[in-house]
Amino acid sequence: MSEERTITIKKQDLWKYSTFLLIAIVVIGGFFVFTGNNFPANTGNNVVAQQPDTQPSIVKASVDDDPALGNENAPITIIEFSDYQCPFCRKFWTETLPSIQKEYIDTGKVKFVYRDFPLISLHPMATPAAEAAECVRDSGGDEAYFKMHDKIFQEQNVLDGGDANSGPVKSTVTFTNNDLKSWAKDIGYNIDSCLDSGKFKSEVQKDLNDATNSGGQGTPYFIIMKSGDKEGIPLSGAYPFSTFQQILDGI
C-alpha cells in the first residue's frame, strides 16, 4: 500500500481492519497447522496464504444468485470460490466445513455461499462438475445442489482410496461426464440433457470471473463479510476450523 494513500476509516468499518490484524496472526499459524501430512504434492493449487502486506485487507464481493446453506438472514456470510476437482477444496470440505456448519451455519450465525472457481488448466473436470451441480439445482433448488456438491466430493474421496466422508485426501482425482451423470442419478436427478447442452457454462464462467475480480488466485478462496455488505475479508487457502473460528468470532 502506498504511503501517500490516505485512508479514512469510518467508525462502523473498524471491525474490518481490526479483524484483518487478527488474520495476520492466525492465518500464518493456521497454515502451518493445516499443511501437515496428507496434502497432495505438486498439484499447482495455490494454498499458501499471501502475506498481509501483499493481500488486500478488504475486497469487493457478491453472493450473486448462487446456492447457499443456512439462515438467509444470518449476520455473517462466507463466500467460498471453489473448484470441484481441487484436492485442497475437497480437504476443506472433508475436514473444516463440517465444524463450520455445526458451530455457525446450523446455529444461524453464518450463511455459506458456494461459487465456482474452476482452475481449468489444472482441473479439466472442474467446469463440467460445476455445471452438473447447477443442473441438479435447476431441478431441485439449493438443497438438491448441496446434495450433489457433497456427492461429487464423496465419490472423489472413494476414488482417492478413502471413506466417502473422510480423507485422507491424497491426490487429484480423475472422473468423467458419465460419472457426473451417474452420481446425479444416485441422488435422484437425471441431468443428462442439461449437462450435454452446456446450459450453465456461462453461469460457471461468471463465477470464475467474479472470483478473479475479487482477488482470487487459487482455490479454495474465501471472502468473509457482514451480510449485506459489498466487501469482505479475503482468505486464500485451505485452513483448519480454528482459523475460521477466530476470524468469525472477531467480526
Image (cartoon, grey):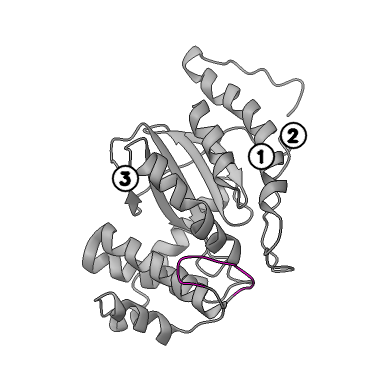
Marking on residue 70: 3
Q: Which segment did they paint magenta? A: 163-172
Question: Depth check: 140 or 127 in front?
Answer: 140
Rendered view: 31 above or below 193: above
Residue at the disc numbered 1: 27
Labels 2 & 3 near each other (Cβ < 8 A): no
Query: Farthest residue toward the right?
Result: 3
Q: Position of residue 204 (x, y in %)?
A: 43, 63
Rendered view: 148 above or below 115: below
**Residue at image coords 35%, 84%:** 182
Q: Is residue 52 visible?
A: yes
Front disc: 2 or 3: 3
Q: Where is residue 126 in the image (x, y as percent from the top left)?
A: 51, 71
Res 137 quadrant in image? bottom left
Rendered view: 237 above or below 154: above
Secondary structure state at the residue bearing disc 2 = loop
Residue at the disc numbered 2: 53
Task: Tell me the amino acid under the disc marked 1.
Answer: Val
Task: Tell me the amino acid under the disc marked 3.
Answer: Gly
